[in-house]
Amino acid sequence: MTSPDGLLTSYPVVSGAVVAATAAVCTVSLAVSRAAPAASRTRGPIERLLGLALVATLAVSAATSLGSVWTSGAMHGWPLLIHVAVGGALTGVLAAFGVLGAILQRTTPTRPLCRVTFLALVVSGFLAAASMLVCTFPILGTSWMERMADLHRYAGLGLVASAALHLAASRNG
Amino acid sequence: MSHARLVLLAALAAATCVAPGVRSQENYKRTDSGRTHAHHLELVDAAGRKFDPTADGAPPFSSYQTCKTCHDIGAIEHGWHFNAAAGGDAGRPGEPWILTDERTGTQVPLSYRGWPGTRQPSEFGLDAVAFLAEFGRQLPGGSTSYTGATRGEGRFRVTGDLDIDCMICHSADRSWSHERWAKTTATQDFAWASAAAMGLAKVEGSVRGLPDDFDKDAEGAASKLPKVTYDRSRIGPDGKVFFDVVRRPTNASCMTCHTRQQVGEGSTPRWLHDQDVHIRAGMDCVDCHRNGLEHHTVRGYEGEQHPAGDAVASLSCRGCHLDQTDGHGGITARGGRLGAPEPQHEGLPPIHLDKLSCTACHAGTAPDAMARAVQTSMSHGLGIPSQTRSADDLPYLVEPTLRRNADGVIEPIRSVWPAFWGYRSGDAITPIPTDDAFKTLRRTMRVRTQLRPDLSRRAPKPDELERALAADRREVPEAEWTDAEREAVRAEVLASVEAEFREGMAKALQAFQKDAPDGATAVYLSGGRAHTLAADGTTVESRVDPAAAAYSWPLGHDVRPARQAIGANGCTECHAADASFVHGTFAARGPMPDAAPESTTMLASMGLDPTLVGTWEQSFGGRSAFKVIGVAALAILALVILLQVTVGVDTLLRGLRRGGGGTA
């Protein structure tokens, strides 16, 4: 079994495109929301704190991974160490954010777009975390671990995109 | 002219163009069979003449010329084992020849290949004949192609050429004698070496004492040359001799020059030492280190460029055990040759396979707190019987140490620190030939056979015992000392011996300085340092010097099985504060006694960031808790996803039902 190397080699380009597209969509969304502000619900301190933690851990994880990939083609050294540590924290934050989000969606009216971006956020987060956590156990061989790393890369990219879109969608009510 | 004739003429012209190549191949006999040909051969002398070995005054047979009758030796002698002087791509730096001289405390890596860190034999006054006499013991011949000497010129007119002896590698039985080969090459009886080593003839006498201008053809000269008496029982009724030849050299043949053993304190006894896992699995050295007729033996490292342009990637560790890909998912060479299993490396993040060579975890002596001393055939003449060989013999080789190679990959290496006397001029150090150096050392340091003091014969003096042992322990017999006491005494003795040595060395350096070329400074390199006279002119100052830096070469064997590999027992085998792989040390070792040798950690040798490594190690302390929390978080996320999907599907179904009710 071999690693689908093509996924790895195309990652810098794909990730660049996804990040650019996400930024564009979010920018347009924010511009629209400023032009026609919608009545947004009040967020509690826990929700704010978790949102902040999510953004912070995700930003550090994305910066260490995408920064390394775009500059040197691979992660190693300090960026890798920071990515692993902050990635662990991100998993915990994501779980709490997921529980809170699920409760809020049951108790307060939520737009369908927010529901979709929220689901994308937790699914991609689950895949990103699970694909690496499974590699910490002596279960998978090199080939499967390489596939898991590919899955992690793309799920992580999905997590960044879905988190950005979810925050933008949430801001719009 | 008809069209058919034109075609015929063109074909003839084309055939004429390729004819030389075709003819050259047809000159040599081939069986093209899987069965080894029975080699009943007429003996041929060095001049290429067939002769009757039963006749009086029969010459020594030449393996080179005898085999040349049917084999393209001209092509063979360009092979890896014979082509050191050929120039071109010398490949990855490998094991050098190490000039060793106990009288002068010399251990210098030499090579004709120009590997960085090695020196040319001529720098130490070794011409081709002297080189072959020194190292012919472990050289399969090739005086011209290996040393660049001209065939039959100079002293070779007396000694004969040390031609390639095919039987060193291709002998099927155990009759080829390494000991006889070593003895005859050491006495410069090159032309007689094959006959003696094969046991085909008794060789009496030597050319060693004959002058360079000795005329072999002069009247009475033959009586001064070695006398060759062939074993008639080995000569057939047709005058031919049976050569028990194998196409594929046996492992034992390779071990003639490629044996390695641990020596010294803590070394594994030979009988407890496992061989390379591949050999134990029934493989032969030549299964991987293979070659064609041209004898470009595959060395087996990653990135090796075969001189013949053949694809040899799948004969490296990685190439054989893993598929080679083109970076886009395409397989360029399939692994699994000879049944090589695909390594699973369960739980080992793949980044390790990018950062480490296979050998880093699988080959050589497993890293210990301190790198160990080893001896090799090429360096210590293993294979030649000796009653005096000891673990303390020069040269001092140390393994395993780890370094980051030019590709940024960490690999295990074996190292030797050059030691010799010379003159420094700027950054360059010109060696003093050992015989010249010895004359001065004999006079100034009273050296007779060995420069380095023999610590095993040095009893501790009362003042040393006084410094090393507590007052109530000084009268205690040595056998009752504790390990700490023994070490303390050893350290005191070593410090005293070093101080005495430095006094003598100052006198020697003063004497060398008198003969120094203008602007040059006398220097002795040893243990990674350059030792020169201090400004006062009477003491010695020592400093780390690039010229004294270790020459190191990657090691590939013995390969340990997966369960014996570093890291097989978990991450903390390397990622821990007490892991030898990272925190083991190795000390520069030279002939000069050194109470505080230059010591380096593997960490520094690998060029790793100690803070980063330390932080990683600390992170492994909480790895179990990290996993538990991670699994719990994932379980929560899974429940959230399940809930969201359930709610979403429920909402969708309700919407569909509502929509369906509307249209009904």
Image (cartoon, coloured by chain):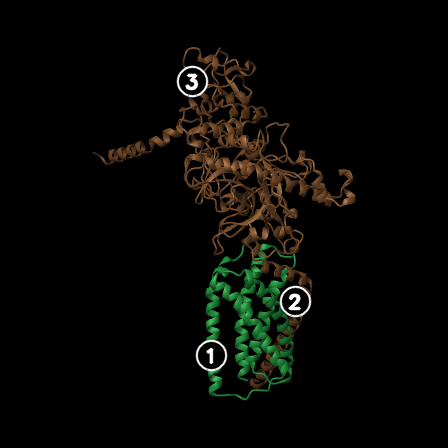
Chain colours: A green, B brown
Q: Disc 1 sits on a residue from what chain? A: A
Q: Earlier in the sequence, mark 3 or mark 2?
A: 3
State the SS at label 1: helix
Q: Pinpoint the chain carrying mark 2.
A: B
Label 1 Cα neighbours within 10 Å, binned few <14 / some 14-19 / many ≥20: few
The percent coordinates of residue B435 (x first, y second) are 50, 30
Judging depth in this view, the residue of B488 and B512 nearest the camera is B512
The three-letter code of the residue at mark 3 reads: Phe
Point out the frontmost of discs 1 and 3: 3
Along the line of sight, which residue is nearer the eye, B415 or A25?
B415
Amino acid type, mark 2: Gly
| Label annotation for residue B214 | 3
User: Considering only vertical position in the picture, is B631 above or below B40?
Assistant: below
Residue A20 spot, x, y in % from top left: 46, 72
Where residue B136 appears, as percent x and y from the top left, is 51, 29
| Residue under numbered circle 2 | B630
Which residue is at a point 47% across and 56% down the rendered structure image?
B328
Residue that badge 1 annotates? A27
